Amino acid sequence: MNSITYLQSLNSKLHQLLNSRDDIIILGEDIQDPYGGAFKVTKGLSQKHPQKIFSTPISEGAIIGVANGLALRGFHPIVEIMFGDFLTLTADQIINHLCKYKWMYNNRVDPSVVIRTPMGGRRGYGPTHSQTLEKIFLGVPFLDIVAPSNFHDPGQLIENCIDNGGPFLFIENKSLYPNPIYIEPSDYIRNFKVEISGEKKFPIIHLSNNDFEEVDFLIFCYGGIVPIVENASDGLLRDEEITSELFIPSLINHFNDWRISEKLLRCKNILIVEESSTPFGWGAEIVSWLIENHKISRNKTINRIGSLHCPIPSSKNLENIVLPSADFIIQTIKDLV
Amino acid sequence: MVLIRRFELKLLELFDLGLLTGTTHTYIGQEAVGVGIISALEDKDIIFSNHRCHGHFLAYCNETDGLMAEIMGKKDGIVGGRGGSQHIQYKNFYSNGIQGGIVPTATGMALAEKIKRTNAVTLVFLGDGTLGEGVVYESFNLASLWKLPIVFIVEDNRYAQTTPTEAAIAGEMVNRPKAFGIRTWETDSFDVTEINEFTSEIVSFVRNETRPAAFICHTYRFGPHSKGDDFRDKEEIDRWKQQDPISLFEKNNNLALESIKQISKDIDIQIERAVSFGKSSPFPSDLI
């Protein structure tokens, strides 16, 4: 198993992109060296490419607007929004500008901007630096949202976003930065047999702890919640002999490439686990998709697990109550079977 | 100026006939600003306009057929009927309907042209009301900090829809860009030639020094903000109409009545052709 981390994958890919292409510009707050960004994703870039790295004032709206202008005139900007919570300040630029121009101008332009941002809690940063706010952007037309898990290669996904073109919101759950990622093809990772489906650019990872035979639970999850679901899945197999299969997309707001096998559709229990709170969220959309496209029968259980529907507390013990934990997932599943 | 005036009068007529839907923001009265400014630009320069964009657009390219069809929502409009009156794109001309939101995008375009060393100047149109938007000041700051070749034009037509500037703007407008170290010009002229000369001076400063500039143009719109939202005194409007930029141009240039009539006649033919073009174009059906 290789030993590169989620953070290293991102950082080395940005170095590589700047070395190999002239049209990449990176903008964000405090991204220049020696600081290299709040989470060090841009470390070392400004030393090697001082003309391509723009540390900006605290002006999230303008940063996205400037990136949009650069893109309309031929560049491929990558923007870092220091904390995903600050995306609220960019909403007009994303919704009414960046994601509108191509369509509104009858495909005469095609601005490509990748907006990277760290999301999520478990660091004790409290109500305004811990949220999972991609939830409010999931339904924006022409905005693709990519949220790599630790089973994806986040650096490669950034490059794929750029090659694909168009506006992308790229969600990096900050709890994943130190995690090792699994990027070499492998049939098994730890207790799981691995399969990959979907478009090659934005792969969907399937993990089964029953060799892709029938399982007790089908679990949908993405991004930073994946290692937690993985732990819960291990615990359930070990202690309760409950088997599960995980469905982990990278492009989280399109169903185009999502396929559920007949075998899996016979699974009695479906669970969706997300780090946002569940009301009106990602899980709700998946449930609708399952019902509309897969005629899910009544003898199944379908459940969602997410954060409690309240701000993320600073106090560690309260944060642990609000965010979904492996123990909570295990208990929920045990109660269901 | 005559083309813009008569084109927009025609739009109002078409609204009354039920041939146009949605809304429109006319430029009538402000023509000297758009024409004076845009005629001072080079082909490579970029214009980002706003909701009140017809005047800027016609000053830029004279594409009456495409604009008329676009406002009618037809397939042969400049952007296939998708954008309508406020959202158009043609060559180096862009417009969008969100107040102030276009300003950072234009700033990014100026950065792009600076990096590419094209020596192109980007020009963005704001209104007095737009000065209420925070992202404008984020953009002023970045443009000055990064020495970007951009001109911020503020067209102060005295009202933000129905709110007079006195009720919306504290302090002097010119002090806003100046506070960011942006060299700022100001005029209350309705003379297109004078505005053109000012602009040439501003644009060559921006091009030669690679620095931003601002140009505050105090003007007046003779028509309502959009439709059915005019609460101004008729006397006030009539007083401003005495400064009509078209009459002023005729007077200053001693244009003979005959030549004015001929210009208007030619323009009306062009506009009628645009109306026929728009009418004969099909409605779009393709959403992709």
Image (cartoon, coloured by chain):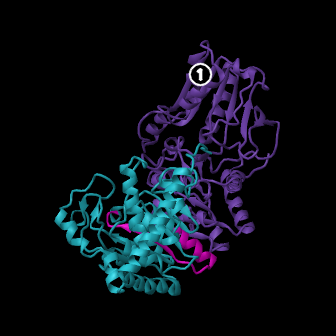
Chain colours: A purple, B cyan
Q: Quadrant of residue B135?
A: bottom left
Q: Quadrant of residue B151?
A: bottom left
The residue carrying pointer 1 sits among few (fewer than 14), some (14 to 19) or many (20 or more) residues within 10 Å by Cα, namely many
* Closer to us: A248 or B222: B222
* Closer to us: A86 or A320: A86
**Residue B152 appears in the figure:** no
**Residue B164 appears in the figure:** yes
The residue at the point 60 percent across, 24 percent down is: A292
Which amino acid does the dot numbered 1 rest on?
Ile
Residue B36 drawn above or below residue A155:
below
Boundaries of the magenta span: B107-129
The residue at the point 55 percent across, 65 percent down is: A69
Would residue B117 be counted in the magenta stretch? yes
Residue A75 drawn above or below residue B41:
above
Q: Is residue B223 left or right of residue B193?
A: left
Circle 1 sits in a helix, a strand or a loop, which is it? helix
* Closer to us: B29 or A7: B29
Q: Position of residue B129 (x, y in %)?
A: 32, 63
The residue at the point 60 percent across, 67 percent down is: A73
* Closer to us: A112 or A110: A110
Q: Position of residue B281 (x, y in %)?
A: 56, 51
Chain to which the residue tagged by mark 1 belongs: A
Pointer 1: what residue?
A: A333
Residue B124 drawn above or below residue B86:
below
